[in-house]
Image (cartoon, rainbow, N blue to C red):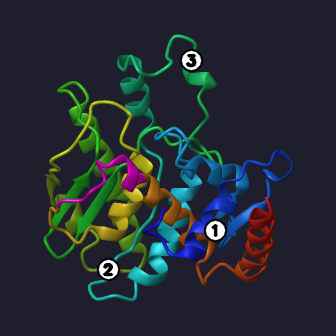
Amino acid sequence: MNEMPKLYQVVADYCFVKYSAFKHEELVKYEAPLMITRDDTVSLAPTASPQMIKSNIVQCWSFLMNDSRLKEDPSCFFFGIDHNRPLELSLMSQDPSQPTSKTNEKEIPSPSTHAAKLNQACLVVVNLLKETTQYLDNREYDDRHRPFYKILASLVVEEMSNFLKRINHEKADEILDYEFDEVKFKWKTPKYTLDCGGFTMMHMLWFTGDPFDSDFDLENRRKVYRAEICAALALAEIYTKRKSLVEKVSRFRVVRKLE
């Protein structure tokens, strides 16, 4: 964590502390229902299972990205949706690393719940400049499951098309015919081991439309990115209770020094 700003380190430490009495404490809140509790942020901790980042964290990250990226040129608009349930269930049934023997569909939390566990996340980019639909995922799929991600991408494009129609955008219908492009990475895995939630959020920040090499395959870097995401969410200027959180972090820092 030495590469992170000191304030980020302390904020991440504060958010990652497991304290059952305050597990429902609101650490991040933008606009209702965009909220992250202490119990949610623990899923971002470096010691947490890579696939268990809560979906509301990705939703809040999308909102935070919009606060800055919509003002840039070219601008970007982000939204998070949970359309990958059939793919998740199918993959889990075939993946020996997943505890399927004691799990059935009724026992798996619905992705529509406030803080559903995120088993697999991906990034779909509707690129108006290149007139393509770009798909980013850190997981390899076999021939049986490969068609699923194209279906997922098409659902996202439909959602975007509906949004553009509501604001009378000239390309609302045109994007439905964009060519599908799977962005290639040198490192991918057939298993749930490379932190799909962290991958998705960091590539929302980094990706500009062209393939690039990142160091997300390095475990230590992924841990740092998780902590940076947590701190960035908590310290965002759009968070109305940011000052109160910083005061709590200051008291926490004093206690840590006394231990």
Span colored in magenta = 213-222
Judged from the image, the secondary structure of the residue bearing numbered disc 1 is helix
Q: Residue 127: image x %, image y %?
A: 22, 69
Label for residue 222?
Answer: none
- Within 10 Å of disc 1 (Cα), the crowding (few <14, some 14-19, many 20+) is many
Q: Is residue 58 left or right of residue 76?
A: right
Using the image, determine if residue 96 lies above or below residue 42: above
Using the image, determine if residue 165 lies above or below residue 202: below
Query: Circle 2 is placed at which residue position?
Result: 169
Q: Residue furthest front?
A: 258
Judged from the image, the secondary structure of the residue bearing numbered disc 3 is loop
Front position in the image: 242 or 227: 227
First in sequence, mark 1 or 3: give its number.
Answer: 1
| Predominant SS along the magenta part | loop
Q: Amino acid at mark 1?
A: Val
Please say whether residue 257 is one of the residues in the magenta stretch: no
Label for residue 10?
Answer: 1
Query: Circle 3 is placed at which residue position?
Result: 103
Q: Amino acid at mark 3?
A: Thr
**Residues at badges 2 and 3 in contact (C-beta under 8 Å)?**
no
Q: Residue 24: image x %, image y %?
A: 79, 53
Judged from the image, the secondary structure of the residue bearing numbered disc 2 is loop
Mark 1 to mark 2: distance in Å?
Answer: 43 Å
Q: Amino acid at mark 2?
A: His
